[in-house]
Amino acid sequence: MPDNIRGRAAPSPPPDFRRKSATSFNGQWWWNAPRPALSDPREKPLTRDFCQRQQSALSLIATLPRCLRAPLHQRYDYLLETKGVRAAFHFLMTVFMQRLWPRIRQVSARYQLNLQISQKLLAEEEMFNRLPDLNDDNLRRLANKLAVHMQDAYEYQCERWLKNTPEDPGILLNDKTQSEIYGNLAAMVRSCHVQPLYVNAWEKGRITAEAVVASISRLVSGEWWERRLRSQQRLWREALMIACGYVSRSVSPYASKNAIRDVMSRRLSALNYLKQCDLENVESGERLRLLDTVLASLSNPKLRRMELMTLIAGVEEVANQHQDCGLFITLTTPSKYHPLRTTGAHSAPFFNQKWDQHALTPKDAQRYLVAVWAKIRTTFKDRSLKVYGVRVVEPHHDGTPHWHMMLFTPRAQRQKVVDVMRKYALEEDPDEAGAAESRFHCKPLNRGGAAGYIAKYVAKNIDGYALDGETDFDSGRLLTDVAAAVTAWASTWRIPQFHAIGIPSVGAWRECRRIRSQNLADQFDHRVEDVRSAADRGDFASYILAQGGIHARRKEQTVRVARELSEERNAYDEPRNKVIGIYAPHLGASHIFLTHTEQWRIVRCRQPDRVKPPCCSPWSSVNNCGSPAGAQKPPIDTKTREIKIYT
């Protein structure tokens, strides 16, 4: 051993190589304890190809409207922070690119500017396709541009006709000429997915020059276009939210949160307007609070619900008198109208692949149900089947509408009525799974309790009255909480919720209720008085019988609503058809009882007289502290209203 290392101590042995596991190991040998992986595979950095795909998906999200862009970015950031880059990448590639993006493209294709119909609005394509994100100023600017395009197109068409026929300038007043001009402008309007006025009459070749002028007066108006674009903006946004699953029992049933906030905002705006206005009598100058007048009408949800329940109770009483049997029928749409599917009552919804091919909206589903009912009604008429009752329209949790109908029919015709309705309900896509059980459901009503079956649906679709503690079947939430979402759904898609079937006019019922403490037997006859007295008592069953009974034709009813053209014209120079009273067809249309004898107009509320404040020393920005007594105030230049300070 060399001398230079003598006396040195031997090095200490290394410590045992033992890794601490998250859980204690009770085995005999420590090396058998489980050890964590050398690296977490979720935290591995993405390859270059994966990064490019991720950036492409994020670029597509950046082009979406804000109603989708914000929640998608929020979900991506949450996954990136909590579960790592791999989970965020899986969300972009699987959820967004494979499931959501095809649906978004399908919906946008239905609402974007259709240049295949007309290319005359090519300059506005970029701005129009950003309609869901446009603010009020940009939307108003787009509306004015479209109105200018319509004005230029109409002038060009008129000049072309005058140039081709200079010897006959009156040809522009011809119905045929105006119809051709209208056809050219209608193509431009339809490219914006807007239906111009009187388009059905034009397609049938029955449009007149006066109707064309009235329709074009709207097309060249920026205010008219602004209203149409706002409505289309709301529908476009809601359709995108439905396509991405943000309208469902797990997120927001019946309507998206954006739609609910939008409807509430518009209602608050209308309420503020009502508070600031009065109704003034044109002749006497009498004033009424506009808000109190509206709350006393059927615009009040409470009064609307009460009238509807009175109508249902009257129909049920008439059915009991005629010994007719009741049917509670539920009519739904085929599977392709539903954007989401479920496997159970409370299961999580998932995307429906049949819907991806068509991207149908709740409005399309409502049109389908109306078409089915039109076939059913025609068959009832051809086979002399008598059916009457009430229809209620409400949405599924994903926004797709379905119908609940309380119908009454003679007992001998019950099976025929059910067979006819089942036939047309299953006419489209009859072989799909569950069609026979889900698309049409019929349940017999017990005598004396028919109104109770539909009262729940009426309250749910209006204000949630008397539904405390009850839960909704579709969403599992309290019915009192979902009533606002259901009304927002109906307001957004403009779907009427209630409709009477086979009973006399409800408009005449309302006009007769305006006549109080006046006997019409002397002025008309006892038949008209029976109708008025039944309406005054609120007895809808007696009103039905006095009007001629169930299925009485409109021309054969005892009392009808009288209307006349008003001298005042609307903003498009069209005469207004207003209600003036009632008349009895069997006594002549000229014999009218006036129920609207006074003219009222909306005016601003009178501002209370301001009390003048007590006289006090004027405030000034100049510090006058230390001014000598008797010092003169600085003069004021009356031209510039500025105080001149002299030193």
Image (spheres, rainbow, N blue to C red):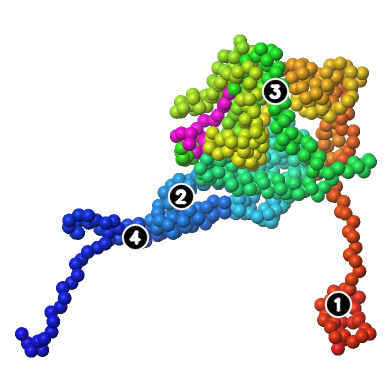
Q: Secondary structure at mark 1?
A: strand
- Residues at marks 4 and 2, CA–CA distance in whole angstroms: 22 Å
In this orientation, which residue lies closer to the viewer: 477 or 263? 477
Earlier residue among tags 4 and 1: 4
Q: Are marks 2 and 1 in contact (CB under 8 Å)?
A: no
What residue appears at the point 76 percent right and 16 percent down from the top-left corner? 545
| Distance (Cα) linking label 3 and label 1 | 75 Å
Q: In front: 82, or 95?
A: 82
Q: Which mark is residue 44?
A: 4
Dot 1 crowding, Cα within 10 Å, few <14, some 14–19, many 20+: few
* Dot placed on the residue nearer the N-terminal end, 4 or 2: 4
- Residue type (three-letter) at the residue carrying disc 3: Ala
Instruction: Tell me the SS state at disc 4.
Output: loop
Q: Position of residue 177 (x, y in %)?
A: 75, 38
Q: Which residue is mark 1?
A: 642
Q: What amino acid does circle 1 point to?
A: Glu
**In whole angstroms, how far apart are the C-alphas of marks 2 and 3?**
51 Å
* Magenta-tinted stretch: 329-346
Foreground mark, 2 or 3, reads 3
Q: Earlier in the sequence, mark 3 or mark 1?
A: 3
Residue behind mark 3: 313
Disc 2 marks which amino acid? Phe
Q: Which residue in the structure is indicated by mark 2? A: 96
Crowd class of label 2 (few under 14; some 14 to 19; many from 20; radius 10 Å): many
Question: Which residue shows up at 70% across the image and 27% down it?
Answer: 309
